[in-house]
Amino acid sequence: MNDLGDIWVYLSSSPLLHLTTTLVAYLIGARLYRRFNLNPLLNPVLIAVVILVSVLLVTDTDYATYFEGAQFVHFLLGPATVALAIPLYNQIDRVRRSAVALLSALVLGSLSAAASAAAIAWGLGAGPEVVASIAPKSVTTPIAMGISEKLGGLPSLTAVLVILTGVLGATLGPLLLNLLRIRDWRARGLAIGVAGHGIGTARAMQVSEIAGAFAGLAMGLNALATAILLPLIWAWVF
């Protein structure tokens, strides 16, 4: 038992432990996801988050310690985001033909995502600080945190809400689109990209390259539109 304790102390102090834990958690999620025929309710990210949070709570590991290892995965988010340009380039003709409809839907989607979240929070009695934190919840995390801070919100709360939004968008978005009988992969990708940012885009990419291309484009343009429009509207309203 002492030997096992010594091994755990060594592993817990090594960044490789938390990197390995992150990868294993995601692999378990991905395995279950494929096992049940890509059921959106079994999103690999959602399963990985549940596993990781459980492990951190059981082992009493703080986030800063965990992130020493997980930062290697975090670093790869940049190259992965840039790589979204490849399917977008492959679908550039479809994007050009849909440019007017795409931009119109994007602006309306961006505004409605922020306005609906802020209105619900405000209606439930939340203060300006919380409303400012929740308004950019459909934007990718780094940009959403910057917008939240500029509006006087809590960036840490915004980060949590963004992740929850992405998981819910990737999990429930396809089911809602099926219920509404939306079959066009361009429309489905655009909706998932605006509502579910990176996590939703990853889900769209697994299903269709066309949906993935439009989701990646929507994710980037939605971040740009929200970063420009939301502070202007916020200053006008408040």
Image: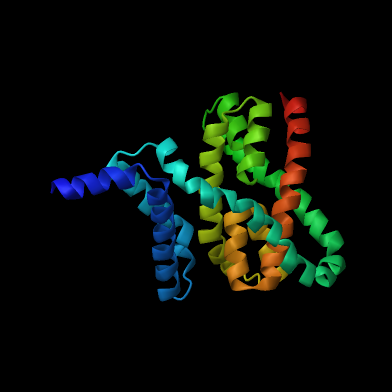
In the picture provided, is 67 more to the left or to the right than 130? left
On screen, residue 212 above or below 146:
below
Residue shown at 58% from the left, 36% from the top = 134
On screen, residue 126 above or below 162:
above
Nearer to the camera, 182 or 86: 86
Residue 48, percent from left and from top: 42, 56
In the picture provided, is 30 more to the left or to the right than 223? left
Residue shown at 52% from the left, 34% from the top = 157
Residue shown at 57% from the left, 60% from the top = 173
Q: In which quarter of the image is residue 180?
A: bottom right
Q: Quadrant of residue 152?
A: top right
Residue 47, percent from left and from top: 41, 58
On screen, residue 156 above or below 238:
below
Residue shown at 69% from the left, 46% from the top = 112
Residue 137, percent from left and from top: 60, 42
Residue reaching furthest to the left: 1
Nearer to the camera, 86 or 114: 86
Residue 17, percent from left and from top: 37, 50
On screen, residue 72 above or below 171:
above
Nearer to the camera, 125 or 198: 198
- How is the rendered protein coloured? rainbow
